[in-house]
Image (tube, rainbow, N blue to C red):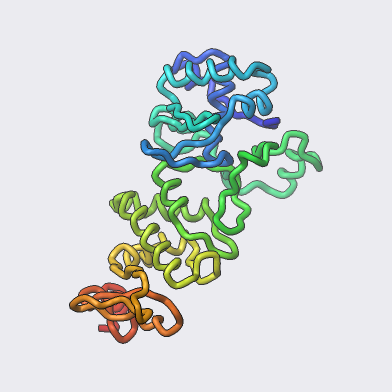
Amino acid sequence: MQFTITINQVKALQWGLNAQQTLLFAFVYECPSWAKPIKVDSGIYYALSKAKIVEELPLLTDKPDTAYRLLRQLEAAGVIELSHTTGITLVRLTDKGRTWNRGVDGSEKYPSKVGKISEEGRKNIRGGSEKSPTNQDTSNQDTNQKDTLGSSGDAPFAYSAEFDEFWLSYPKRAGGNSKKGAFKAWNARIRSGVPAQDLIQAAKRYAEQMQAKGNVGTAYVKQAQTFLGPDEHWREALSSNIRQFPAGKNGRPPLGDGEFYHPDWESGTKIVCHVSTHDPDTGYTLEYMRKRGLI
């Protein structure tokens, strides 16, 4: 059962939502922080069954059909979009719905961190225990989605659909990989004018490179926030034309004009590079070497 739900009465009144619709939307608004993302042709949605709503919101309704009817009403109000796969309802926020927790200046109206609180203040607030925990994770393990590709202690957080597509494309790694930290770095790149699709494509190419080297699931995969950070490692992946080939009869595929085997070939990595983008001696991208004054 959901312990705590934050309701923005001002938005609810502006949007003409009744009490039931408001309660359900406040719950749906948190879905990107815990529900399983599902990629369909029209983008990223989140799995949210009618039974899940009934289980988590006993004050709302005990009837799955009523829960679905309320979802359709929220869709008609323009705050969510619905889709379906076999046997499960998919939901995502609209641009209008994403403004639920924002002030008129675009900032979060109820941010997860509002500044420093003294230890004494924390103790007074908590009273030594948490009857209504701030952690809004839900009890159904089948639909919970951890915020990391490795491990992390991130709190519930609302992510954009474009970032979730990036996150699903990014290679898994061993160890910590903060989704929230990566989202902050993502937003910094977006604010600087980098197209979201460039970052998504960079993640896909980086995943291909790590797969070719056999590094997926290891600590050799960069943390996503480092990949998206100010050093712009994502640009190296985006500009790379390293590509994986099926082995030929002699174990090595034929090379085209200007192509060469990556230096890691002897370790079993079946990839080739092109001299227009990579240094034959090191395998580094030329852009990477120029940025560091190596050429």
Q: Residue at x 51, y 71 (%)?
A: 220
Q: From the top left corner, tell me how far across and down residue 79 is, in percent.
A: 44, 24
Kindly indicate the quadrant of the structure image that contains residue 176. Answer: bottom right
Instruction: Check the picture and name the quadrant holding the N terminus.
Output: top right
Q: Nearer the viewer, residue 263 or 288?
A: 263
Does 135 sit left or right of 48 as displayed?
right
Q: Residue at x 75, y 40 (%)?
A: 126
Does 75 sit left or right of 35 as displayed?
left
Q: From the top left corner, tell me how far across and down residue 28 is, in percent.
A: 54, 29
Q: Is residue 44 above or below residue 228?
A: above
Q: From the top left corner, tell me how far across and down residue 289 is, in percent.
A: 30, 78
Instruction: Check the picture and name the quadrant holding the C terminus.
Output: bottom left
- Residue 262 in view, yes or no: no
Q: Nearer the viewer, residue 73 or 16?
A: 73
Q: Is residue 15 above or below residue 254?
A: above
Q: Residue at x 20, y 78 (%)?
A: 258
Does 145 sit left or right of 248 as displayed?
right
Q: From the top left corner, tell me how far across and down residue 18 is, in percent.
A: 53, 13
Q: How many marks?
A: 0
Q: Spot the residue most to the front.
A: 249
Q: Is residue 18 above or below residue 37?
A: above
Does 265 sit left or right of 86 as displayed?
left
Q: Spot the residue most to the left.
A: 257
Q: Residue at x 41, y 39 (%)?
A: 40
Q: Is residue 233 above or below residue 70?
A: below
- Residue 228 in view, yes or no: yes
Kindly indicate the quadrant of the structure image that contains residue 95. Answer: top left
